Amino acid sequence: SKLYKSINVNEVVIIAFNARSAHLAVAAKSINIKTIGIMHGLQHKEYDVYEFMESYNESRKIGCDVYGVWSLHYLNYFKKHSKIMSPQNIFYSGLLRPVKKFEKLHSFQRASKNKIKVLIISEPLISVSEIIPFLRELLKHNDIEAAIKVRPMVRDIYYQELKEIFPQSLKLKVLDGKIEDAAPDYDVFLGCHSTAVIEASLFGKISVLIETKKFNDYFEMDSLIPERSLLVTKPESLYKNIVDRVKNENSLKTITKIRERFFGDNLDGTQWIINQLE
């Protein structure tokens, strides 16, 4: 708070209320400086507990004075579960980085007529030992062409571990650029908890989620379509699930359903922040 006073800060923008930034928000609020927050990723109350703190029961809220979320689904989710912010201070802001080439999807189109092209998303928070059985089954099939999207500008520990204990992964094409540049060449994004897997819907691609012990059904995929399971729970089911999803996407419309749930109308959250600062 002394630093804020010394440099005459009037507002503070917080990208997610977490261990790296929560103290900044609390310090600002202690001297009545407006705090503005926005979602950084697809949070879940069972994992990103710092955004929710459901056991918090104080009258004075420690969360941001105004907080932006990506979709109407998350607006309802945060209002219901977050106890560190008042419901009336949570708003549908849109994405921090909205997709520039965003178009409403009319129908799903394969990237290639020859093989189903799968982009595996590197996820360092999960042990590759949970993922390898699924990849081993997937790579048995000649009508699947797979690549792996690694994290740019850093040593990707997920991929490094994968190479060490699963030599077949050395045959995978490795992509380290922007995901929006890679997306047009693939049909399916594959992973278990990363926002990038769900971002497939923003590019008109299919998101296939694997169940793991750590993250389970992290995005609650099995609630997306009543009486139809989309979560892949067994390695031997992965190939069939992918083929089925690709074949039937235009009737299932999972891309549209996922996009609407998690990203809404691709509103500009950055502009929302600017508006809050004015």
Image (tube, helix red, strand yellow):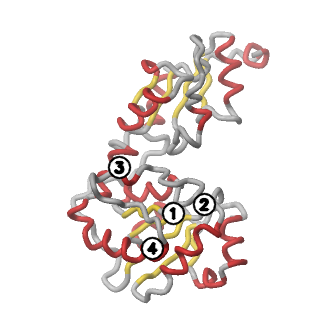
Q: Amino acid at mark 3?
A: Ser
Spatial distance from mark 1 to mark 3, Cα to Cα?
A: 18 Å
Label 4: element kind = strand
Residue 90 in sight: yes
Label 2: element kind = loop
Q: Amino acid at mark 2?
A: Glu
Spatial distance from mark 1 to mark 4, Cα to Cα?
A: 10 Å
Q: Which circle, 1 or 3, is nearer the viewer?
A: 3
Q: Earlier in the sequence, mark 4 or mark 2?
A: 4
Q: Amino acid at mark 1?
A: Gly
Q: Amino acid at mark 4?
A: Val
The reply to whether dot 4 and dot 2 touch (C-beta < 8 Å) is no
Compare residues 249 and 178 and report the one nearer the observer.
Answer: 249
Instruction: Give the labeled residue for mark 3.
Output: 223
Q: Residue at x 53, y 23 (%)?
A: 83
Instruction: Give the labeled residue for mark 1.
Output: 191
Could you tell me residue 84's position as x and y percent?
A: 56, 23
**Residue 118, which numbered label?**
4
The reply to whether dot 1 and dot 2 touch (C-beta < 8 Å) is yes
Spatial distance from mark 1 to mark 2, Cα to Cα?
A: 7 Å
Q: Determine the image quadrant of residue 27.
A: top right
Spatial distance from mark 3 to mark 2, Cα to Cα?
A: 23 Å
- Dot 4 surroundings within 10 Å: few (below 14), some, or many (20 or more)? many
Q: Is residue 167 above or below residue 216?
A: below
